[in-house]
Amino acid sequence: MASSANLSSNPLLSTWNTPFTLPPFESIRPEHYKRAFDHALAEQQSEIAAIAGSTEEPTFANTIEVLERSGATLKRVGGVFFNLAGSHTNEAIQAAEREMAPILAKHRNSIFMNEALYRRVAALYDKRESLGLDAQQTRVLDRYNTIFVRAGAKLGPEEKKRLAAITERLASLGTQFSQNVLADEKSYQLVLETGEDLAGLPSFLREAAAQAAEERGLRGKYVITLSRSSIEPFLQFSKRRDLREQAFKAWASRGDNGNATDNKAIIAEMAALRVERAKLLGYETFADFKLSDTMAKTPDAVQRLLSDVWTPARARAEAERDDLQALAQSQGDNIAIEPWDWRFYADQVRMARHNLDEATIKPYFQLDRIIEASFETAHRLFGLSFQELKDFPKYHPDIRAWQVLDANGNHVGIFIGDYFARSSKRSGAWMSAFRSQEKLTGDVRPIIVNVMNFAKGGAGEPSLLSFDDARTLFHEFGHGLHGLLSNVTYPLLAGTAVSTDFVELPSQLYEHWLSQPDILRRYATHYRTGEPIPEELLERLMAARNFNQGFATVEYLASAFVDLELHRRKDVTGLDVSAFEKEILEKIGMPREIIMRHRTPHFTHVFAGDGYSAGYYSYLWSEVLDADAFMAFEETGDVFNKDMAEKLKRFIYSAGNLRDPAEAYTAFRGRLPTADALLAKRGLAALCE
């Protein structure tokens, strides 16, 4: 055990005398993490031993509540470490991550496989109806019983030992998978030097590419990276087909290059371990195990939804492909459309059909103004206000933070925005928490972070977003509100701690308000003139919302099918990842001109951890809910209807995991949804008739 002097000098373990007790980021060094983790793990192990070894008759207070209070230091240390491991990592943090992954998995196993501890929980669960618990306590007890059982608490000693080894190995493999993808993304750069290299690139992309080059010590040149905010507009605008192909293939082959960062062997081992894990717990497949604790419940239910949407989506995508091919031929481009051509020609078709291209739209979507739009929406729906902090600890100079207040001026929490792509950050966009809300240990207010990968504007220029980028910002802020508005007593139920096919409802629903004309009229303003987006451009933007929707739906669904099919296999011995991916795409009739949104070797949702494994369908499942939920607002004639917003806050955004998801949605809407609103939203309804 470290000495008390060493502990007090470790900023992760000392008192945080910072604004709003934010983590003292500037004082934390990589070597602090291991010592802090060692102390925090020992502390919780002692706490768990005291609960499990108690001779008192188990009660909710002396078992469940004490269990909920345990591990406070571990949550604090882990909250800082894992957020920075994703958003601002380095070799030292990555080494610590590899070391800690199996240790933390082993620690979790030691809690949820603890026989004496589970006996106390099970004894309470068996007589739960006679304990006089309120609804929230009943939910906590039910969730803990489920967690223990799913972690293997009922298994015999040998089965527990094997399951523990599996989960520890999976933790190590998931960490390596994620680091391999980041390494591939970090190592690639397409350097553009000549006017010919830059052909077709609009000024905003040139400025962002110049900024990326300067950050890499290539002043005077231009760099395209594998960040989605860099590569996608390059594929959209570059007239150099050879460079588009080169960049696209690098993007598509992350984790699949036959080198030290190749992920295919990791995937094969993870898939086999997941099958074994499921069978130890009494399930035929990993998908059966994973989905049993979700809204969907079964793989068949997921398969039905994916298939129902796939048929009209593929038909739309094939019609879109024919339009692209016709345009290419009309221009004398004697080519067959390839995946690296789709965005290039689609932009031209959109221009022809809607007189709308990205270069026209982007000047009206400044990052700062879209942040303001997301805050204004939260104010109109939930009465929140946001006061930017100027002096607070930062883990990177680019991050910003706001104090969030409710309608009465009371402190709600802290919101951190980390918006720009950098080589120390993994790709994608996500929400996380440095601290979650709860009331068990006092009125604990949350610290929520949104992490993005937008391209930074050139020197003195604002960062400009595509409409999809703006939608991503609203999406992640919807998750952020789910964490900020959480209003529960028990940490286990707080914020986004809900099933994966329900957690996307608050985020995807929030996207709808970005498209409201009065929001766009006010916040979509030209970055040079300050003029609001012209009405006729706004009309064209709204008319084009479902443009290329076949492509977008197909690339997403293909990833969901591959994820589901892989985890439905009862035997994956000798899995050839590339052959499997090819087999499933052929089975569903994947158009040759489109690839999966996330190819298996870089599918971090599914393999960088357990979160969305057998669960990538969740975005579509939640979209059924969000389309129907927004319709509830539209039916009132006011998309900011106060009564609906109050119900939304009460039953969804602030409720955490207080209720079963179906019960929560029904409490808000009065019924469960059908897929009709989803198909209408994506413009696919007519293709089903």
Image (cartoon, helix red, strand yellow):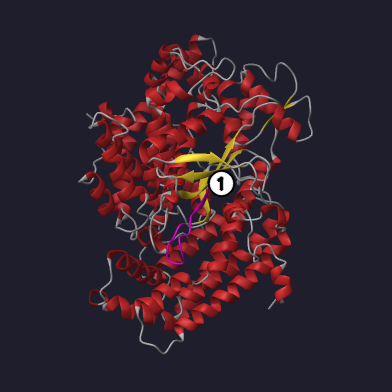
In the rendered view of the protein, which quadrant contains the C terminus?
A: top left
Farthest front residue in view: 408
Quick check: is 256 in the magenta stretch? Answer: no
Residue 626 seen in render:
yes
- In the rendered image, the quadrant that contains the N terminus is bottom right
**Which residue corresponds to the image point at 46% horizontal and 19% vertical from the top-left?**
324
Question: What secondary structure is the magenta-colored segment mainly?
Answer: loop
Mark 1 = which residue? Answer: 602
Three-letter amino acid code at disc 1? His
- Crowdedness of circle 1 by 10 Å Cα count: few (<14), some, many (20+)? many
To which quarter of the image does residue 8 belong? bottom right
Task: Determine the residue positioned at 38% across, 44% down.
Answer: 506
Residue 650 percent coordinates (x, y): 31, 49
| Residue 517 spot, x, y in % from top left | 38, 23
Magenta stretch, residue numbers = 437-450
Secondary structure, mark 1, is helix
Q: In this view, does 305 lie above or below 664?
A: above
Residue 593 seen = no
